[in-house]
Image: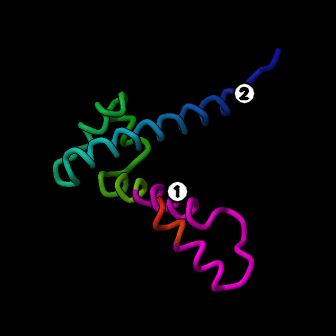
Amino acid sequence: MVRIKADEVDRDNSVDKVEQILQGAMQEFLQHGYAGTSMDRVAVAAGVSKATVYSHFQDKEGLFKVLLEQLASKKNNSIFGTEPIKGEPAVILHQVATKALEK
């Protein structure tokens, strides 16, 4: 029988909660814009309490910043990948531009 340590469970739950909150925030920001989105709306959309939202994010601005950083990182990885870029600069530039325009 495998035993999971309590701190590992807490960490996994915390990561899941953050992802839920970010998904709820994305939904609300897209639907209502920055000004029309409140932490209350995010909590409802994420299916968590307002206290849970505030336990992970200090305020709406911080939540928005993390969401944008996550989206930018995903986009960056989809274009450039996670491995170092090697090859002829002209070929690499063409590949990067093509990927950026496709996605």
Mark 2 and mark 1: Cα distance apart in space: 31 Å
Q: Residue furthest top?
A: 1
Residue count near mark 1 (Cα–Cα under 10 Å), binned few <14, some 14–19, many ≥20: few
Q: Give the overall secondary structure of the magenta segment.
A: helix
Q: Is residue 41 above or below residue 92?
A: above
Q: Residue at x 27, y 48 (%)?
A: 30
Where does label 2 land, which residue?
5
Q: Secondary structure at mark 1?
A: helix
Q: Residue furthest left?
A: 36
Residue 80 belongs to the span the image colors magenta: yes
Percent of width and height locating residue 76: 53, 64
Where does label 1 land, which residue?
74
Q: Is residue 81 left or right of residue 76?
A: right
Which amino acid lies under the numbered mark 1 shown in the image of this protein?
Lys
Q: Indicate which disc residue 52 carries.
A: none
Closer to the eye: label 2 or 1: 1
- Which is nearer the N-term, disc 2 or disc 1? 2
Residue nearest the viewer, comparing 51 with 93: 93
Q: Which residues are magenta?
A: 68-97
Residue count near mark 2 (Cα–Cα under 10 Å), binned few <14, some 14–19, many ≥20: few
Give the quarter of the image for residue 92: bottom right
Circle 2/circle 1 CB separation < 8 Å:
no
Residue 37 belongs to the span the image colors magenta: no
Q: Residue at x 43, y 56 (%)?
A: 66
